[in-house]
Amino acid sequence: MNAVTAHKIRKTFPAKGKPTVALETISFEVGQGELFGIIGPDGAGKTTLFRILTTLMLADEGTASVDGLDVVKDFKEIRKRVGYMPGKFSLYPDLSVEENLRFFATLFSTSIEENYDLVKDIYVQIEKFKKRKAGALSGGMKQKLALSCALIHKPSVLFLDEPTTGVDAVSRKEFWELLRNLQGQGITIVVSTPYMDEASLCDRVALVQEGRIMDIDSPKGIVDKFGSTLWSVKADRMYELMKALREMEDVASCYPFGQEHHVVFKDETASPEKVKRSLMDQGFADFKFHPIEASIEDCFMKLMTSHNA
């Protein structure tokens, strides 16, 4: 039995003119004990999907189940079995760290002491601040408190909606280490993130854009399907360089990536030297032009381009 199953989930919201489509026939499965990532930018539909799977919102069409239970018919039982950490900090800022944790434990008729083994690796990092008001914690500490509260009733499936947004790089790394430890305890984890680099930390990922899943695979599987030679291009006047590359007949795509541009040619036989000479003729200088390995973000950009074509 899969831990999570979604089949042709569709959700729209009222808007002037025609309704806004948040999710369009979303289907996927998450295996027991898997760390599954929903990867996509803001507005891709990640939060709407999580709210449906955690029984906080009804889909317009389609079906979904968590732990083999239907999200509509069995919503009360599902709420006992899942942990949910929304993207926005939703704990009580005027309660202390300890008071928040005890409050959430009470909601599920349990206690900190009863399930301490499950949260101890996380809680020990914030325990010295246990008397501090939750609203006065740093971003990373708030996330660890929220995760502790989502785990205190020992859920079988954990939903984390953009848990590292706005958190510093060190705290992000620590947070993902905590998730791996939780997975080792048999908890299924479904996590959403707009950070493409976090995709490589999941067992499998679904790349989503505008309410649609573009691909589902392991991070390595997605990269292996890139299927084209990717080129890194740098020169002076980078903005003008991007415009010039996009106007070239041989160039299929060109987009900025940090301090370089990533370029894919329409034909693998296209000559980089020919492109370089053409750009030099247009007055560009200080060229750096070499093939590189594609990343998850490159794969996302290619998929997005093909879906919008």
Image: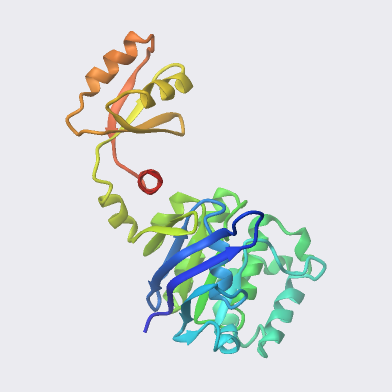
Q: Could you tell me which residue is drawn at 44 percent across and 62 percent down?
A: 37
- 230 relative to 67 in the view: left or right: left
Q: Could you tell me which residue is drawn at 65 percent across and 57 percent down?
A: 15
- Residue 297 visible? The answer is no
Q: Residue 160 is drawn in which quadrant?
A: bottom right
Task: Tell me how the rendering is colored.
Answer: rainbow
Extreme right residue here? 94
Picture coordinates of residue 157, whole percent (x, y): 50, 78
How many numbered marks, from 0 up?
A: 0
Q: Residue 28 is drawn in which quadrant?
A: bottom left
Q: Could you tell me which residue is drawn at 60 percent across and 81 percent down?
A: 116
Picture coordinates of residue 22, whole percent (x, y): 55, 60
- 40 relative to 127 in the view: left or right: left
Quadrant in which the C terminus is drawn? top left
Q: Is residue 86 above or below residue 223?
A: below
Extreme front residue here? 17
Picture coordinates of residue 180, whole percent (x, y): 45, 67
Q: Is residue 100 above or below residue 37?
A: below
Quadrant in which the N terminus is drawn? bottom left
Extreme left residue here? 269
- Residue 87 visible? The answer is yes
Q: Nearer the viewer, residue 164 or 78?
A: 78
Q: Could you tell me which residue is drawn at 46 percent across and 17 percent down?
A: 237
Q: Is residue 226 above or below residue 13?
A: above
Picture coordinates of residue 278, whole percent (x, y): 29, 14
